[in-house]
Image (cartoon, grey):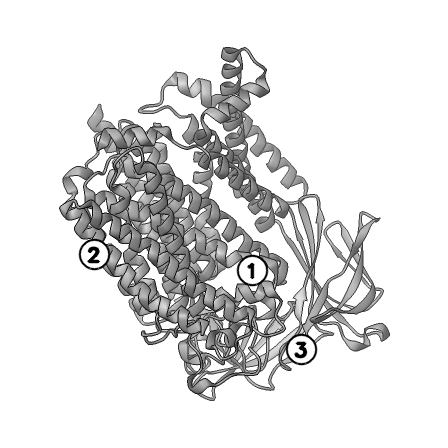
Amino acid sequence: MKKQSRLKIIAASAVLLAGMMFLVVAMTRSTSMRHFTPALLVAAENEAHDQRVQVDGLIAVGSSQWDAVDFKLTFAIQDRETEATVNVIYEDRLKPDNFKDGGSVFVEGKYDATQNLVVATKLMTKCASKYEGAESAVSTDETSYISE
Amino acid sequence: MTAEIGQAAIYLSVLSCLWAIVFLGIGLWIRNARAIQSGRNAVVATFILISIATGALIYGFVTDDFSMKYVVEVSSAAQPLLYKIAALWGAMSGSLLFWLWLLTVGGAIVVWQNYQRNKQTQDTLADYSLIPIAIVQLFFVILVTGLIEGIYNPLARFPNGQVVADGQGMNPLLQTPLMAIHPPTLYIGWISLTIPFAFAVGALVSGRIGSGWILRSRRWMLFSWIILTIGITLGGNWAYKELGWGGYWAWDPVENASFMPWLLGTAYLHSVMIQEKRNMLKLWNILLITLAFQFTLLGTFITRSGIITSVHAFGGSGIGGYFLSFILASTAGVIGLIIYRWNRLKSANRLESLLSRESAFLLNNWLLVGLTLIILWGTLWPIISEAINGEKSSVPEAFFNKVVIIPGLLLLFLTGAGPIISWKKITANNFRRMFLLPLVIGLIGGALTWGFLALIGYTFPLYSVLCSFAAVFVLAAIFAEFYRGAKLRAKRQETSFVNGLNLLIQRNKRRYGGYIIHIGIVILYIGIMGSKGYFLLESQTMTLGESMEVGKYKLTMIDSFEKEYSNYLRSGVIFDVEKNGKRIGTMEPALHAYYTAKPDEEPTKESAIQHLGVNDLYIALASVPRNIKTGGVVNVQVYYNPLIGIVWIGVAVMVLGGIVAIAEKSERSKDALISEA
């Protein structure tokens, strides 16, 4: 009797473990998005076309336009290291606080390679808390993002 | 001069930490009471020295000493006093010092409690646990000395006597009272986890792995748990009120870093009961507390190391390596001790049945640890995916939302089933007496929810129905426990039911405090179900006089305003709010333009939140144009968040339950110690 219930317990644990692992793997596969810098996204345009992607870079100086009438934000994300840019359109949502030229930005959305455009569903700017490196005593290097 | 004194105090504390480690180690090894006392004194000395350093930094803030690097970085002359002091944890160096200071407070408390206790019994467990505490302190002391690349000493001045005219000040978004309390609350929660961990290490080193260390560490863990619960919620509440995106939880790595130790702490609080009652899971408890402690460091590592740079571009600060090394070294140390004490870690009893209180606890632990690992997986997916196929990917919020639902609902069910299932093995009688009625009531609750949601247009809300079923079942099960217990007490003491209830809780605060926490959990779940599952979001471009509709509510933008305050300009619009044609009030979403803001910094959103019972109407604005009175347009985003008020109530009930439970000073713990010694 004892042995039997031990077996049951082991079997139940195995089922639970397998179930959890299956859930995690399945959800990871279905939701995982590739992450790009603007330069890498432009380079991988064929693969990335029509895929949900994440892009992380800087708000290209002078590129951002807020169209209040159509409730639409357009701007370009510039690569941190190269000149490559990707256009972004973000509609029917407010701009996050801290959205400013040259600032860090992170977008999530579908990439249209023909127009080099990400139709963003999520847009985050850098968060206000400023944990930073030592040398930046007089800069305001910030850390996490504020999600919108 | 004060800054120099503070710096000297930090350097001296390297010595006091080493002193504590060496003298406690030797004293316990050769059983020399004077050496042990000397080691204890060194722990107190570290506390005094770090208090001096922290005081010196606060003095720098208060006196606007802009020759100090750190003061310039996070404070400014115009900053209100509260935020000058809050600047202590406003950036890396200061927050490490603050973290260290809290840890030295913890060390001093352990010494004090030990002193009190030793008046009655001679017990060396606390002395053993002071060694790991001093080691962790030493790690943080070294980080703040400024001798390590990547972090400067928080008391350092600019070179060559340079003085800056004014500091940069703290970001306006952080200048809210909530933000002044939120970080230190989380810190206290994280740091107090060091103490139960230290007791576990002390138990391993001393070889006394019975229930003594468990009883000593349990209250510390409960304390951490309460504080972490408050801290995490304050963060969510701040995000909700300040950030203008209508939500309170987004599975951001920083949030996850605070949530994972909480989950592990919750698991530990449950598994220790098994060790107490059935003398099982000794090894598991040591592993759990070790994991919980390591996760507080891992959280720092994840968020501050720059390791997930490409996703969230955290300032790569170079301290990640030190944290990772410390995590690995201390884990290796614990594993070594476990192997050394392997024979004493065996369980005295075994699980007897799949359907028993023990199994319910075990399942609870599996699920909580499983959830932690799932969240860790999602948080680290950028690194994992890159390691697997060289492509950096990450998972969105939706991953977490989807993946936690099923384990989360199972856990909810267990909050009711665990306390009423019998030990060792469920019996037919136990099932009939305890389960049947709550299950039936739960089914009715689930069916009613289904009916209600179907009426308002949701055809098959599976998870909501399951959640309501489990929630109602748990409430029925727990209220029945209270009812039965109170009635029995009342009968035995020949007093009223209310007195009986009071006596019941007074006599067993831990148990019934725990049940109150469970009630809070149920309330929290219902709040999350409503606010995450059924919120409405409408965006519209509007001019004055226009209206928009959100659910049953009609919002008319009737006016705009502008008002000057001491450190910002507030501009906004006024909405008239109607429900089903009946006017219920006005709302004033606004923007705050801080005078100290840099030219390219935009005003911050100050969303308007109208509480309608437990539901919220939430309005955020993008900007208020100058020509608003003459037809200029405003972009408005409105959320209707059903049941969100219940989220905060649920947490408040959980905290209340925690306070009831922690109030029980276990007399048994002393007995246990004596019998063990």
Return the residue found at the far bottom: A83
Foreground: disc 3 or disc 2: 2
Judging from the image, mark 1 belongs to the subunit labelled B
Q: Is residue B288 above or below residue A108?
A: above
Q: What label does residue A66 carry, if any? A: 3
Reading the image, the residue beneath label 2 is B22
| Secondary element at tag 2 | helix
Q: Position of residue A4 (x, y in %)?
A: 22, 28
Q: Residue at x 26, y 33 (%)?
A: B280
Reading the image, the residue beneath label 1 is B180
Foreground: disc 1 or disc 2: 2
Image quadrant for the N terminus of chain B? bottom left
How crowded pointer 1 is (Cα within 10 Å; few <14, some 14-19, many 20+) is rated as some
Mark 3 to mark 1 CA distance (whole Å): 33 Å
Mark 3 to mark 2 CA distance (whole Å): 64 Å
**Callout 1 touching callout 2 (CB < 8 Å):** no
Q: Residue at x 82, y 64 (%)?
A: B546
How crowded pointer 3 is (Cα within 10 Å; few <14, some 14-19, many 20+) is rated as some
Q: Position of residue B17 (x, y in %)?
A: 28, 59
Q: Is residue B33 among the parts visible in the rendering? A: yes
